[in-house]
Amino acid sequence: MKALVKKEAKTGLWLEDVKEPKPLDHEVLIKVKNASICGTDVHIYQWDDWAKKTVPVPLTIGHEFMGEVVEVGAYVNRIKVGDRVSVEGHIACNSCRNCLRGKKHLCVSTIGVGVHRNGGFADFVAVPEDNIFILDDSVDDELGSILDPLGNAVHTALSFDLVGEDVWIVGAGPIGMMACAIASRVGARNVIISDLNEYRLDLALQLGATQAINAKSQKIKDAMKKGKIQIGFDVVLEMSGSKAALRSIFKNTMLGGKVALLGIPKEEIAIDWNDIIFRGIEIKGIYGREMFETWYKMLSLIQSGLDVKKVITHRFHKDEYEKAFEVMISGRCGKIVLNWD
Ligand code: NAD
Ligand code: ZN
């Protein structure tokens, strides 16, 4: 079968012929239909420091995908051949304290599909039954391939009550853009997004932001004034990982406000903790998606009208993966879907 492989410990990815996986007793085999490129895949493509210390070589990459189940292992009973499915890419150990108390997203020994073990940028991929999410008709084949990042957005955005609140979303990457749609859908008053990329700011407005500001040339205080926000934001969703952004957040959060941190900084960042202490700010770190509460919420939101399809801006055939990664790296895009047929 064909798979997109990190074949060598250097920059690049290779579309190779590899052996088809055989599902273990507790696994299912999926014929992949659509896959979507994540920032993580770009790190692996570029072979940065994080990738070097995390990813074993050779490895088939890809953790955002959907497809059809074509084979099930002997102990599988919930999933059937023919099911249309998407996959939770974090495989939990099911035996640590957090797994046993129902917090599998905080498993102490999570394994990442397409990061630590072979992933879904392939004709076929084997995944534990526990990680399968069955798709219904409300989720089309393209949307089905971006549920992992949509889940990040849902997990972060629903961490705090947004009804009638003033929300600042920092970073208009695909996840920030989708968070705009969610915040707007659940009834936030202001949904103000900031980024440095005009292409993405425009798209964020189409997804439901009430204002989109360029952090390089516009002031957040001006956006607040326009949105009738007097003191600070009730809720901030950090989705950029930027040092400058992280430092400015706490100075613009309401006393008693809440901050959810999803963005992954590249370095240690010094923060003036006085801003947090004296304002009584609540901070929550976000990792992955809650298994499977986030997935149920996500499906319910879609079924009740949440529309994030505009975040998909490009479609390529798997053979054009080099072009797809080029566009992804340029930043002039939302989500990019690879058609794996
Ligand atoms: P992305 O890299 O596509 O988007 C980040 C955006 O932040 C970019 O558009 C960039 O221009 C913008 N940005 C940079 N500096 C900024 C600044 N000073 N102010 C405002 N915006 C700025 O990433 P994504 O795929 O949308 O993911 C968002 C973040 O979440 C990334 O940091 C990613 O690594 C992280 N992430 C975390 C988890 C988790 O489980 N915690 C999961 C997935 C992604
Ligand atoms: Zn565990």
Image: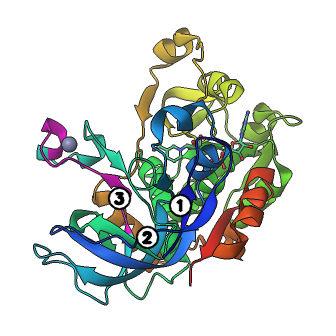
Q: Is residue 27 above or below residue 152?
A: below
| SS under mark 3 | helix
| SS under mark 1 | helix
Q: Is mark 3 within 8 Å of ligand 1?
A: no
The reply to whether the C-beta atoms of the residues labelled 2 and 3 are less than 8 Å apart is no
**Mark 2 to mark 1 CA distance (whole Å):** 8 Å
Q: Earlier in the sequence, mark 1 or mark 3?
A: 1
Q: Which residue is mark 2?
A: 301
Residue beneath the point at 62% across and 31% down: 232
The reply to whether the C-beta atoms of the residues labelled 2 and 1 are less than 8 Å apart is yes
Q: Label 3 neighbourhood size at 10 Å, few (<14), some (14-19), many (20+)?
A: many
Q: Nearer the viewer, mark 2 or mark 3?
A: 3
Q: Which residue is mark 1?
A: 182
Residue beneath the point at 86% across and 37% down: 218
Q: Is mark 1 within 8 Å of ligand 1?
A: no
Q: Is mark 2 within 8 Å of ligand 1?
A: no
Residue toward you, 15 or 326 = 15
Answer whether residue 306 is visible to the viewer in this image. no
Query: Which portion, as a residue range, is magenta?
Result: 87-99
